[in-house]
Image (tube, rainbow, N blue to C red):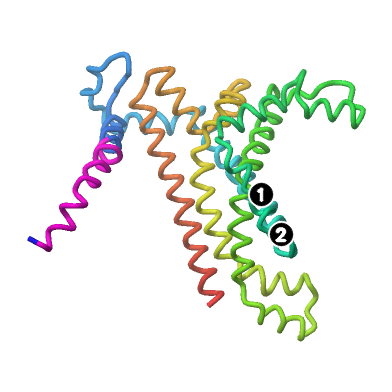
């Protein structure tokens, strides 16, 4: 009886997890194999097998959103890595007020993505945005730049908002790596006559790589599910040129009502996220072996 007590105490939590997580996953997986439409509840019993998945593989709009998501993910992750590494290296050199600077650095990640979306939508506004105001009054530009109307510029604006919001994740994790790094290897490199760049390239950076791949794993899952900022700033426009997988999935499921097709799209995006996670964990394991 005593041995069963831990399992009995865990039972309420397990039931809640099953109701909140497991059942919706099973339902969404099942509905991805059906012709389920929100406007026709009886279509939930219309089993069509892999027809939704086959349709997606033949849909160019889906492939454009898929490729745009990969591009967005690549740009954002690399920019956040470079900026976060630079901020971490600068913060490590600070001897007084470092705690205050670390707290200030974390401010952007404390804002919700919806609030960040509204903030940058205002900043990149054609007529009253502060970005165009600076370009016109500080750099002499005559015409306002249509940041959220031009497809390429709109994707750039989305990337800027995402990078501003989440660069502190990289900075804090890499700063933790720098602060935990032993000083003996750096001092040995200086004694051997290595320059500052050589010491960073061959000593500091290899030690930081496990922290880099941990940050990459965390952020790839978040960026791969990017929705809030895109929804607020462009809503997938103009002409679908900033449509990512998750915004396309929301449009397909809740606007068009094709929930079965949207759930199939969601599971393809989950496979994409899992592929990035497996890749980054392989890199993480290799980096740990190199450090050890």
- Vertical order, 273 against 58 (above or below): below
Q: How far, Cα to Cα, is label 1 from label 2?
A: 10 Å
**Looking at the image, is 107 positioned above or below residue 133?**
below
Under tag 2, what secondary structure? helix
Q: Is residue 194 left or right of residue 74?
A: right
* 22 drawn magenta: yes
The residue positioned 30% from the left and 33% from the top of the image is 28
Assign the N terminus to one quadrant of the image.
bottom left
Residue at the left extreme of this rendering: 1
Q: Is residue 3 left or right of residue 27?
A: left
Marks 1/2 in contact by CB < 8 Å: the verdict is yes
Identify residue for label 2.
91
Residue 219 coordinates in the image, percent (x, y): 54, 48
* Residue found 64% across the figure and 33% down from its top: 158
Q: Residue furthest right?
A: 140
Instruction: Give the image location of residue 130, x and y in percent.
Output: 78, 27
Name the residue nearer the viewer: 82 or 45: 82
Front one among 112 and 75 = 112
**Which corner quadrant of the image does residue 132 belong to?**
top right
The residue under label 1 is: 105
Residue closer to the observer: 112 or 41: 112
Q: Main secondary structure of the magenta part?
A: helix
Left or right of 159 in this view: 15 = left
Q: Which secondary structure, mark 1?
A: helix
Quadrant in the rendering for residue 25: top left
The location of residue 189, given as percent across then percent down, is 73, 81
Q: Residue at point 66% right, 78% down?
A: 183
Determine whether 19 is above or below 7 in the image: above
């Amino acid at each position: 009886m005593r041995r069963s007590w831990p399992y009995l105490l865990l039972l309420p939590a397990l039931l809640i997890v099953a109701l909140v997580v497991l059942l919706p996953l099973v339902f969404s997986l099942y509905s991805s194999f059906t012709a389920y439409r929100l406007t026709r509840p009886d279509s939930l019993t219309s089993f069509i097998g892999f027809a939704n998945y086959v349709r997606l593989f033949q849909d160019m709009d889906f492939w454009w959103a898929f490729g745009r998501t990969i591009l967005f993910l690549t740009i954002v992750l690399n920019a956040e890595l470079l900026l976060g590494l630079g901020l971490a290296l600068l913060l490590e050199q600070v001897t007084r007020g470092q705690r205050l600077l670390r707290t200030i650095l974390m401010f952007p990640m404390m804002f919700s993505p919806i609030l960040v979306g509204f903030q940058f939508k205002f900043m990149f506004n054609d007529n009253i945005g502060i970005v165009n105001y600076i370009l016109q009054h500080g750099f002499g530009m005559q015409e306002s730049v249509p940041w959220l109307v031009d497809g390429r510029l709109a994707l750039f604006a989305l990337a800027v908002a995402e990078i501003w919001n989440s660069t502190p994740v990289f900075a804090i994790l890499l700063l933790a790596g720098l602060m935990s790094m032993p000083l003996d290897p750096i001092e040995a490199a200086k004694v051997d006559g290595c320059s500052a760049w050589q010491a960073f390239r061959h000593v500091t950076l290899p030690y930081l790589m496990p922290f880099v791949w941990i940050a990459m794993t965390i952020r790839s899952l978040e960026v791969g599910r990017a929705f809030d900022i895109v929804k607020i700033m462009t809503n997938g426009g103009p002409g679908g040129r900033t449509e990512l997988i998750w915004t396309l999935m929301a449009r397909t499921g809740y606007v068009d009502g094709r929930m079965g097709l949207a759930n199939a799209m969601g599971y393809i995006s989950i496979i994409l996220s899992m592929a990035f996670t497996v890749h980054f964990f392989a890199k993480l394991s290799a980096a740990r072996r190199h450090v050890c």
